[in-house]
Image (cartoon, rainbow, N blue to C red):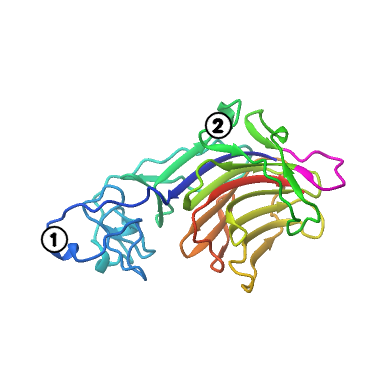
Amino acid sequence: MYMSSAFLLLISAVSAIPYLPHDDAGKHKRTLTPDNTCGGSNGYTCNPNDSYGGACCSAAGYCGNTDAYCGTGCQSAFGTCGPSTSPQPQASPLPPKTGSAGSSSPATKEGCLWTVDGSSSFTHNLNIDFSTLTAIPSDSLANSTDPIGSSIGSSSYTQLYTIDNLAVKDGTLQLKVPGGQTASPILGAEVSTTEKNILYGSVRTMMQISSVSGTVSSPFFYKSDSQEADIEVITGGKYQGIHYTNQKATLTADQTTVTFTSPADLTSEMHEYRLDWLPDRTDFYLDGVKQTTLTGNVPSIAGAWLWNNWR
C-alpha cells in the first residue's frame, strides 16, 4: 500500500468563530454561528463582519461569500443574500497524482476557511506530500503500535501494527503486511494524525493498493468502535471490493455499509479515495466521483484520522 494525503479539517478545539460587534441590533439578538453552519435545525446566523466565513447562508447550511452561498437557495433569514462581490478565491494545492486516475476539485480559500464543492467549510488545510520527505512528519502523523486484541470484522486474526512495517520510500508512505503469516497476531502497519480532536473533515488519500490477495487498506476516521467512518479496500476472498461504512453507533443500530466492485485496477497506479465527514452525513468518492452517501450512524464526536494495512 502506497499513499499520499490531503486533509481539510474542522478542529473542534479551535473552530469557534468569535463574535464581532455589528451595527444591526437585530443581529445581536440572534445566535451567531460558532462553526460556520447556519439556518436549518440549529438556527445559527452568519456573521457579516466575520472574515472566517461569510455573510451568506447557503441552501446547504454553511456561511460564505461566493455565489454558491449568496445565490440560488440562499437563506435570507440567517444572513445576507444577493450577487457576490467577493474576489474569486485561489485554489489550494493537492498532492501530485500518479497515473490517469481523476481527482476531486481543489478546495478554495475564503477568508480563513477552506471550502469544498461550495457547500462545506473547514478551518484547517494540511497537505502531506511524501515525494519531498524521507521520514514520517512527526508534527502531523504518528505510527500506531497498540495491539488490536480481538479480531476485526472480515478477519479471523488479531492485529499488531509495528514501525518496522512503515517506510517513506520512492516518494510515498508504504504500509506493509509481511507475507507468510499464518497465526495471530498478524503484523501490519498504521499511522494516525497527531491531532486527536478532529470534528468533521474532507480527507483525500492518493493510494495504490497491494496486488496480494487478502489484505485490507483503509483510510478512516476513528474515535471508538461506535464513532467510526471507513473506506476499506479488500483485495481478496468473499469480502473483496471497496467498502464504505459508518460503524454502528449503538449495539442495536442497523448496519450502515455499502460495497462496490472497483471500476478500475486499483493495484497498478495511484487512485484518490476521499471521505467527507459532515454533521448529517458521510460522502465517499473514488477519483473525484461520488460513490455513495451514508446518513445513518454518522460519527458526532471528535477523534483522529488513520490509515492502515492489515489482514
Q: Amino acid at mark 2?
A: Pro
> Earlier along the polypeptide chain: callout 1 or callout 2?
1
Residue sitting at x 56%, y 65% = 294
Q: Can you say which quadrant of the picture contains the N terminus?
A: top right
Main SS of the magenta segment? Answer: loop
Q: Nearer the viewer, residue 195 or 219?
A: 195
Q: Is residue 271 above or below residue 134?
A: below
Is residue 194 left or right of 114 when viewed as pictured?
A: right
Q: Nearer the viewer, residue 42 or 161?
A: 161
Crowd tier of the residue under label 1, counting other residues whose Cα lies within 10 Å: few below 14, some 14–19, many 20 or above: few
Q: Determine which quarter of the picture holds residue 3.
A: top right
In this figure, which residue is indicated by the disc labeled 2? 137
Is residue 54 left or right of 221 when viewed as pictured?
A: left
Crowd tier of the residue under label 2, counting other residues whose Cα lies within 10 Å: few below 14, some 14–19, many 20 or above: few
Q: Nearer the viewer, residue 292 or 311?
A: 311
Q: Position of residue 244 (x, y in %)?
A: 63, 59
Q: Position of residue 108 (x, y in %)?
A: 39, 45
Q: Position of residue 255 (x, y in %)?
A: 65, 69
- From the image, state whether disc 1 or disc 2 is nearer to you: 2
Q: Residue 24's mark?
A: 1
Q: Residue 7's mark?
A: none
Q: Amino acid at mark 1?
A: Asp
Query: Is residue 204 located in the magenta-colored stretch of the structure?
Result: no
Query: Is residue 178 located in the magenta-colored stretch of the structure?
Result: yes
Give me the C-alpha separation between circle 1 and circle 2. Answer: 47 Å
Residue 97 in view here = no
Say what secondary structure mark 2 lies in: loop
Residue sitting at x 82%, y 48% = 184
| Magenta extent | 176-187
Residue sitting at x 13%, y 63% = 25
Q: Position of residue 258 (x, y in %)?
A: 65, 64
Say what secondary structure mark 1 lies in: loop
